[in-house]
Image (cartoon, grey):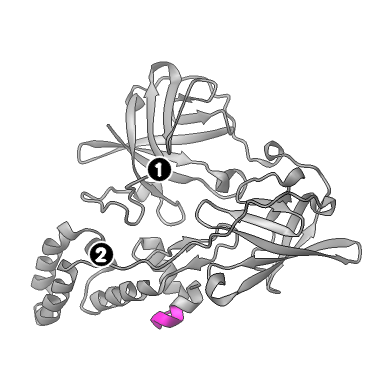
Amino acid sequence: MKIGDFAKACNTNISVLRHYDKLGLLKPLYIDRFTEYRYYDKSQIAVFERISELKAIGFTLAEIRLLLSCDDSTEEIFAAKKAELERQLRDLERLKSKINGGIIMEQKFKALIENTDLPFVNDEQVIGKWRVESENGSLGSKDRELYFLPKGEFYWCFGWTNGKLIYDDGVSRYVNDYRLEERGDDLYMIASFKSQDYPETGETTAIALRKLDDVHYTRDMIARKDDISKPFIPDDKVIGRWKAFCHFDPSELSKEDFVPLQNPPEGSCNYLSDPYFKEIEFAQGGHVTAIYGDEVISGDDKSVWTRGFWLRKWNSTACAYEIKSFGGKDYLIIEWKSGDYRFGGRESDYYVMVRE
């Protein structure tokens, strides 16, 4: 369900849910990269209610985050809270038993998956650059630009064939119908964009796009590019192999505020049990080996490094890094410039790697 519907189900405000999301307390199960709609599952209502219970007896949001994510910290936090709030001991004991029993939520959320392997049928009118003008009559995602590349070539989350806008963000994939309308001298596209609730509700969002030009763009022409011509400067501190520890969005957590949890729960929040970006090794002389999924990427023709940057030649991105130490361990905080950065105009996410 969308964030507005979830807020109503929880009897709260959207601003509260956005705040909980930013703090990592209650994150949406899915965020559509294009519309930026947040989607929640009905089972998460119980998580919201648990947070409300804990707040009601005096726990801070920081304490609640630890209680929900780290079982090992439960006893210490409860002991401190008992001393602070003796008059609420009975409620604390009741909630302690619930917490110690574990918060196991059945995640019923299912990504919208459709067959997107469609034969390409050309539609010369749509090739070029389009700008989002309105969404359901409102400003919505106004000023975003979308490209229709020749032969339906895929870029970022989008591809197309005649009458169909294809969306695939690596989590969901589905097909959206579009139609063309001439309004004066302008050509408009009305795309019926499917929501994550579409299988249950049949709900779509009408998005109007206005054509800006007829240029036959390529992926290389529209991709954001960094300066990767930086000279090599050695940095002995980065030498070695690093393994993925966590991932975060700078809109939710600044790298200056990053502090690793002592006992991060695998697979929860942004802590990674099976990361896509698994490892990176920095060798003397600027050589780099990285592991994405099952693929090992190495060779100076693919990427190199210099002090403060990992220079990825294959997609012209310069990923800044810095090293911080916590509890005697070194952590490498490195920019992760994905399609959202290269084609979506967004700022870089971050991976945090721990030294092997």
The structure residue drawn at horizontal position 80% and vertical position 50%, both measured from the top left corner, is 122
Magenta stretch: residue 215 in it? no
**Where does the image place residue 119, in percent across and percent down from the top left?**
71, 50
Quick one: SS at disc 1?
Answer: strand
Label 1, residues with CA under 10 Å away: few <14, some 14-19, many ≥20: many
**Residue type, mark 1 in image:** Tyr
Compared across the picture, whether 318 is left or right of 10 comes to right
Instruction: Identify the magenta region.
Output: 7-13
Element class at badge 2:
helix
The answer to whether residue 13 is seen in the rendering is no
Within 10 Å of disc 2 (Cα), the crowding (few <14, some 14-19, many 20+) is: many
Q: Which amino acid does label 2 sit on?
A: Leu
- Answer above or below: position of 149 versus 240: below
10 in magenta: yes
Residue at image mark 1: 351
Read off the residue under disc 2. Answer: 68
